[in-house]
Image (tube, rainbow, N blue to C red):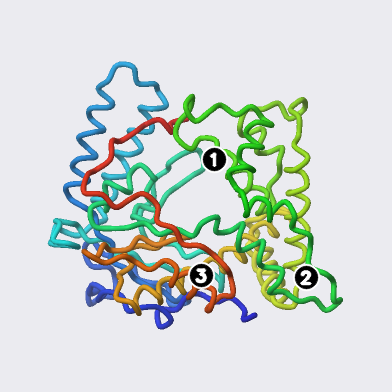
C-alpha cells in the first residue's frame, strides 16, 4: 500500500478561482493568511445562506427570552451567537449563489499536516464550543444544529456510514508482516459494523444510560459512539465512564466492551508493525518526540494511529470527490467522513455508483448514505444538547 500523503490540489477536482492577494504578499482585506509553502492545499468556496443566518438569529432570540431556560442552554445559545458573529466576519459580501439564493462566500483552504492525518480548513477563526473543544468557523466545523441554517436550501449531506470502524475492520486484509503473522481477531468490531444499533443498545442498557426522550434525540447513540471513538484511538473504558459521571470503582463493566478494547489495542500494534505503515510510524514518532508536545510514548502512539486512520479516511473522501466531479456534481464543503454537495434540480446522486468507485479506488467496501439536511424550510433550533 502506498504511503499516505497530503491531498494535493492536482489530485482533486479544480476549485473556484482563488481571490487575489495584495502586492505585498500579505492577505487582502477579508482574505486568509498566506499559505505555508511546506504544504499542499485544496481550496473550496463555501456558501452561507443569508436568510438562514437571519432566521437562526431570530430563533435564538426567541429561545433565550423564554424564562425556563437553564444556564447550560443559555451558554449554548451564546456559543451559537458567537459562532455566527465570527462566521459573518469571515465571509465575503452577499452575492447570488447556488440555485439563485442570496449567499455570502467563504473561501476555505484545506490541508493535512506532516504527510498524513485529517484534512482541516486552516487559517480561519475558531470558537470554543466546550471545555477544551474548539471548532473552525466554516460549514465543515459547524455545530450540527447550525449547519442546516447555513446551507439546507441548496445542499445535500452525504456521509460514510459507520466510517472509521468499517475502515479499521477491513484494514488488516490490506496489511502484511515480515513475520507472516495472522491478522488480529476483530470479532466484536465486526459485530459493531454489522449491527451498530444492537451494540449501542447493549452498552446503554449495561450502564443504564438515560433514554433519548429524557435527554435529547440520539443521546444514547452519541454517548456510545464517544466510547467507540475513545477505544479506537487508544483511550480507555474508565475515562469514558468518568466523563459520563459514573463511579469507576463500582460501575459494572461490559465483557463485550473490554473484548472490543483488547481487539482494538491488538489492531493498533498490528498496524504499527505492518510493512505498509512501519516507515510512517517511525517517522511520525520521531517527529512528535522532537516537538515535545506529547508527554508519553502512549500519547505519541495515540496521535500516530489517529493520523493513520484519518489518512485512510482521506483516501475515501478523495475518491468520492473525484466521482462527484466526473459526474457533474459540486462539493461545497468537506466534512471529514462525508461531503456537502450542491443540489441539482431533477437529478439524484447515484450512491451505489459512488460506493463502487470507492471500492475500486481504495479497496474499502463502504456505504454512502444521505443524512437529513436538504429542505426548503429551516429547522426549529434546539438547545437540548446543552450539558
Image vertical order of residue 101 relative to residue 15, above or below: above
Badges 2 and 1: C-beta atoms under 8 Å apart?
no
Please tell me which residue lies in front, 355 or 381. 355
Say which of marks 2 and 3 sits in front: 3
Q: Where in the figure is residue 52, as x and y percent of width and height?
A: 21, 46
Q: Helix, strand or loop at disc 3? A: helix
| Quadrant of the image containing the N terminus | bottom right
Q: Helix, strand or loop at disc 2? A: helix
Which residue is label 1 attached to?
A: 221
User: What residue do we see at 30% from left, 36% from top?
Assistant: 381
Density class for disc 1 (Cα within 10 Å; few <14, some 14-19, many ≥20) is some
Left or right? Give the position of 77 relative to 356. Answer: left
Q: Quadrant for residue 348, please give it.
A: bottom left
- Image disc number at residue 316: 3
Q: Earlier in the sequence, mark 3 or mark 1?
A: 1
User: What residue do we see at 40% from left, 52% from top?
Assistant: 371
Image vertical order of residue 255 relative to residue 369, above or below: above
User: What residue do we see at 64% from left, 47% from top?
Assistant: 230
Which residue is label 2 attached to?
A: 273
Badges 3 and 1: C-beta atoms under 8 Å apart?
no
Most extreme residue toward the top, as rendered?
Answer: 67
Q: Where in the figure is residue 368, as x and y percent of width and height?
A: 46, 62
Q: Where in the figure is residue 84, as x and y percent of width and height?
A: 28, 45
Amino acid at each position: 500500500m502506498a504511503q499516505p500523503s497530503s491531498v494535493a490540489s492536482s489530485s482533486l477536482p479544480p476549485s473556484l478561482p482563488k481571490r487575489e492577494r495584495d502586492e505585498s504578499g500579505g492577505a487582502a482585506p477579508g482574505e486568509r493568511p498566506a499559505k505555508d509553502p511546506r504544504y499542499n492545499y485544496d481550496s473550496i468556496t463555501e456558501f452561507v445562506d443569508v436568510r438562514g443566518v437571519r432566521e437562526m438569529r431570530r430563533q435564538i432570540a426567541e429561545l433565550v427570552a423564554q424564562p425556563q431556560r437553564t444556564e447550560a442552554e443559555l451558554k449554548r445559545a451564546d456559543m451559537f451567537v458567537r459562532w455566527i458573529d465570527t462566521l459573518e466576519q469571515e465571509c465575503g459580501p452577499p452575492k447570488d449563489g447556488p440555485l439563485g439564493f442570496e449567499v455570502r462566500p467563504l473561501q476555505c483552504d484545506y490541508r493535512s499536516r506532516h504527510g498524513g492525518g485529517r484534512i482541516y480548513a486552516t487559517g480561519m477563526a475558531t470558537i470554543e464550543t466546550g471545555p477544551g473543544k474548539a471548532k473552525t468557523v466554516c460549514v465543515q466545523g459547524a455545530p450540527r444544529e447550525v449547519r442546516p441554517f447555513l446551507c439546507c436550501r441548496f445542499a445535500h449531506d452525504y456521509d460514510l456510514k459507520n466510517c472509521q470502524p468499517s475502515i479499521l475492520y477491513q484494514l488488516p486484509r490490506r496489511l502484511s508482516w515480515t513475520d507472516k503473522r495472522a491478522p488480529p481477531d476483530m470479532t466484536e468490531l465486526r459485530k459493531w459494523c454489522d449491527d451498530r444499533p444492537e451494540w449501542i443498545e447493549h452498552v446503554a442498557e449495561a450502564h443504564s444510560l438515560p433514554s433519548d426522550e429524557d435527554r435529547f434525540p440520539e443521546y444514547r447513540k452519541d454517548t456510545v459512539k464517544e466510547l467507540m471513538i475513545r477505544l479506537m484511538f487508544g483511550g480507555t473504558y474508565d475515562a469514558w465512564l468518568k466523563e459520563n459521571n459514573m463511579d469507576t470503582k463500582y460501575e459494572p463493566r461490559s465483557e463485550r466492551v473490554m473484548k472490543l478494547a483488547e481487539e482494538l489495542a491488538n489492531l493498533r500494534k498490528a498496524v504499527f508493525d505492518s510493512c505498509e505503515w512501519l516507515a510512517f510510524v517511525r517517522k511520525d514518532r520521531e517527529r512528535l518526540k522532537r516537538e515535545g508536545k506529547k508527554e508519553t510514548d502512549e500519547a505519541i502512539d495515540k496521535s500516530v494511529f489517529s493520523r493513520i486512520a484519518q489518512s485512510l479516511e482521506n483516501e475515501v473522501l478523495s475518491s468520492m470527490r473525484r466521482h462527484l466531479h466526473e459526474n457533474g456534481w459540486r462539493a461545497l464543503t468537506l466534512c471529514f467522513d462525508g461531503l456537502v454537495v450542491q443540489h441539482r434540480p431533477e437529478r439524484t446522486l447515484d450512491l451505489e455508483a459512488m460506493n463502487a468507485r470507492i471500492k475500486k479506488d481504495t479497496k474499502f467496501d463502504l456505504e454512502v448514505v444521505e443524512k437529513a439536511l436538504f429542505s426548503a424550510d429551516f429547522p426549529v433550533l434546539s438547545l437540548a444538547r446543552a450539558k
